Amino acid sequence: MDYGKLCRMTQKPFRILQLIPTMQSGGAEQSCIDVTAALTQAGHVAFVATQGGRWSGEIIRAGGKIIHLPLKKKNPLTIWRNAKKLEKIIRDHKIDLVHARSRAPAWSGYFAAKKTGIPFMTTFHAAYKFSSKLKQRYNSVMAKGVRVIAISQYIAQHILDHYHTDPSRLRIIYRGTPLERFHPNMIHSERLIKLAREWQVPEDKHLILMPSRLTRIKGHHILIEALAKLNRDDYFCIICGATPDREHYQEELHHFIAQHGLKEKIRIVGICSDMPAALRLAQLVVAPSLVPEGFGRIPVEAQAMGTPVVASAIGGHKEVVIDGETGFLVPPDDADAMAAAMNKALDMNPAERQMMGNNAMNFVSQHFGKEQMTSQTLAVYDEILSGG
């Protein structure tokens, strides 16, 4: 991508302030880092206001400037205080545009931008739930931008259905995947051997991998039921993503696994520090979510590695997997359908597996690369600041 050309689109460098609650981990945080890097490479100036976190250093390494504010807190008084602080930051640093990536900081940024007379925009990273008019109003700030980026068509439709947003202000920009990391050629055998030993994966088994947070909505119970229905002995399953704060749910899953007689076939492990290697090591990746995903990062990353994926046919999954060509889609909360799709994936011959892997890698490269996301986001900045 010609970052210099993007920079020359304006008469002077942008001075962009992104707002995000923390920089711990996650898709919104990674997008924030990637856009920061793209801005600085294009000669612009990137600021990120955040409460901080273990990924804060990535902003600095990307060339951005960190401003620490308690943006995670949802207390109305704190939101108002943050708005006043952001007003000063905008004036002191001559910020041209505020880009909010979450609700609490978005309210502060919205008021500050309005007070200082600069544009305010948002990225809608999820279909925020609401059960009352008050919660819907709280969420509505994410639809108040002069431009509103939706990370999928599913999210865009959610915005139109619930927030009466002018469609002309919407831009669909899929979350970007760093293909320089998620590509089979980047994974050396030593990384695969190390991970297989760490997880104690039997050499003669197909590895089925489910990477996800340990939360009920991800569909762990459906996967376990489906594995019990496979009626085959040539697989081993790793569920990764366990954290100490989810010990109660993890114990529930262990009990469920034992009930189905699968203690020797399923292992729950902690957070994986080398996800590209994990996705390459697996013969099959599963994403049996019970509620719609805004995008579907795991299916995309698995396909980028050329690994077959079985995912629930809801939300963003329907946009990032082509059923039967790049992976398999199944109805949510349907263990029978999940088992049938997993059997089909595991029974593919080498030529069929190679064809699906190539289709998947090409599909991801064409639509979900990091460069597409960053260039399209910078184009939105230019559109706003050039009066488009």
Image (cartoon, grey):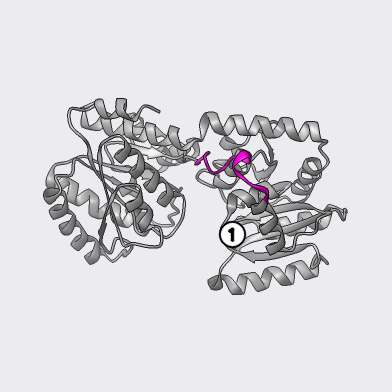
The secondary structure making up most of the magenta span is loop
Front-lying residue, 198 or 322: 198
Q: Which residue is mark 1?
A: 272
Front-lying residue, 127 or 342: 342
Lateral position of residue 172 relative to residue 198, left or right: left
Res. 353 image quadrant: top right
Does 315 appear above or below 23?
above
Query: Where's residue 172, x and y in %?
Result: 42, 34
Q: Do we see residue 105 in this rendering?
A: yes
What span is in magenta?
Answer: 178-189
Query: Where's residue 342, x and y in %?
Result: 77, 46
Residue 184 located within the stretch drawn in magenta: yes
**Quadrant where the N terminus is found in the figure:** top left
Query: Where's residue 387, x and y in %?
Result: 20, 27
Q: Residue at x 71, y 49 (%)?
A: 282
Does 388 appear above or below 305?
above
Query: Where's residue 376, x and y in %?
Result: 38, 31
Res. 314 image quadrant: top right
Q: Residues within 10 Å of mark 1 (few under 14, many from 20)?
A: some
Q: Do we see residue 324 in this rendering?
A: no
Q: Residue at x 45, y 40 (%)?
A: 151
Given the image, on which type of amino acid does mark 1 rest? Answer: Cys
**Quadrant where the C terminus is found in the figure:** top left
SS of the residue at dot 1? loop
